[in-house]
Image (spheres, rainbow, N blue to C red):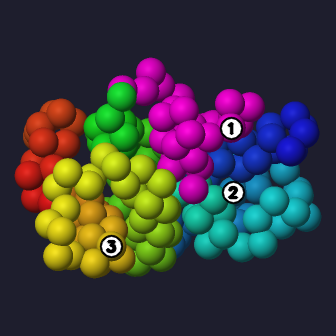
């Protein structure tokens, strides 16, 4: 992706996340996104075939950032998420969630969030698969690999939901500890 395409993509992401601060994802239209991003409709569709695929790309952007920050991705990739990454992948994710970067908690807690949760869990599953050594010490030997990976991803999603429903009262470090105790 050249610099101009990357800037356009960032403008679309920024417009989308700005709108998320105002309303639920289901009420955001492509027209509102392109108006706020100051791009044409054809430009939007050149980057994303649908608003749902924009949502999927947004989720993938977060997990790509987490993977790259762990040193497992491309150093040339520029992310919409920026931070000083801790050594723990799980803590890193919880820190972004606590900061509500790009209004991601709105996506996790809004009505009709099933599609985002599906994308979130798929991306999380890929992250777990590529960093399985982080979780292997907690795995009972009799559990099948696929069950274990699904359990980790599901537990993470439900931990985030519980944490959010309880006002993010615990620190990212505490919720990370709870998560590892639960798996």
Tell me the mark number nearer the camera, choosing from 3 and 1. 3
Circle 3 residue: 145
Circle 2 residue: 33
Q: Tell me if 30 is positioned left or right of 84 in this view.
A: right
Circle 1 residue: 74
Regarding residue 162, the answer to whether it shows in the image is no
Question: Which secondary structure lies at badge 1?
Answer: loop
Mark 1, Cα crowd under 10 Å, few <14 / some 14-19 / many 20+, is few
Q: Tell me if 25 is positioned left or right of 76 in this view.
A: left
What secondary structure prevails in the magenta region?
loop
The mark nearer the N terminus, 3 or 1, is 1
Q: What is the magenta range?
A: 60-86
Q: CA distance from mark 3 to mark 1?
A: 27 Å
Name the residue furthest top.
84
Expressed as whole percent of the image width and height from the top left, the position of residue 129 reads 44, 60
Asked if 128 appears above or below 169 in the picture, the reply is: below
Do the numbered discs 3 and 1 sit on residues whose CB atoms are within 8 Å?
A: no
User: Quadrant of residue 114 in the image?
Assistant: bottom left
Question: Which secondary structure lies at badge 2?
Answer: helix
Tell me the mark number nearer the camera, choosing from 3 and 2. 3
Which residue is more in the foreground, 183 or 65?
A: 183
The residue at 47%/25% (across/down) is 83
Q: CA distance from mark 3 to mark 2?
A: 41 Å
Q: Tell me if 113 is positioned left or right of 42 in this view.
A: left
User: Quadrant of residue 111 in the image?
Assistant: bottom left
Question: Which secondary structure lies at badge 3?
Answer: helix
Which residue is more in the foreground, 17 or 161?
A: 161
Regarding residue 16, the answer to whether it shows in the image is yes
Asked if 116 appears above or below 13 in the picture, the reply is: below
Asked if 57 appears above or below 14 in the picture, the reply is: below
Q: Quadrant of the N terminus?
A: top right
């Amino acid at each position: 992706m050249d610099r101009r395409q990357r800037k356009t993509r960032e403008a679309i992401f920024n417009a989308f996340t700005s709108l998320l601060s105002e309303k639920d994802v289901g009420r955001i239209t492509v027209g509102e996104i392109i108006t706020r991003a100051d791009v044409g409709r054809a430009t939007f569709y050149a980057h994303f075939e649908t608003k749902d695929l924009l949502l999927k790309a947004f989720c993938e952007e977060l997990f790509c950032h987490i993977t790259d920050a762990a040193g497992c991705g491309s150093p040339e990739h520029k992310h919409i998420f920026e931070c000083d990454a801790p050594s723990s992948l799980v803590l890193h994710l919880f820190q972004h969630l606590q900061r509500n970067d790009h209004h991601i908690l709105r996506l996790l807690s809004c009505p009709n969030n099933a599609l985002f949760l599906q994308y979130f869990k798929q991306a999380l599953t890929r992250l777990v698969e590529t960093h399985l050594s982080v979780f292997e010490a907690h795995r009972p030997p009799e559990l099948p690999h696929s069950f274990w990976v699904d359990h980790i991803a599901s537990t993470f999603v439900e931990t985030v939901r519980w944490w959010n429903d309880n006002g993010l009262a615990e620190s990212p470090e505490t919720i990370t500890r709870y998560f590892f105790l639960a798996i």
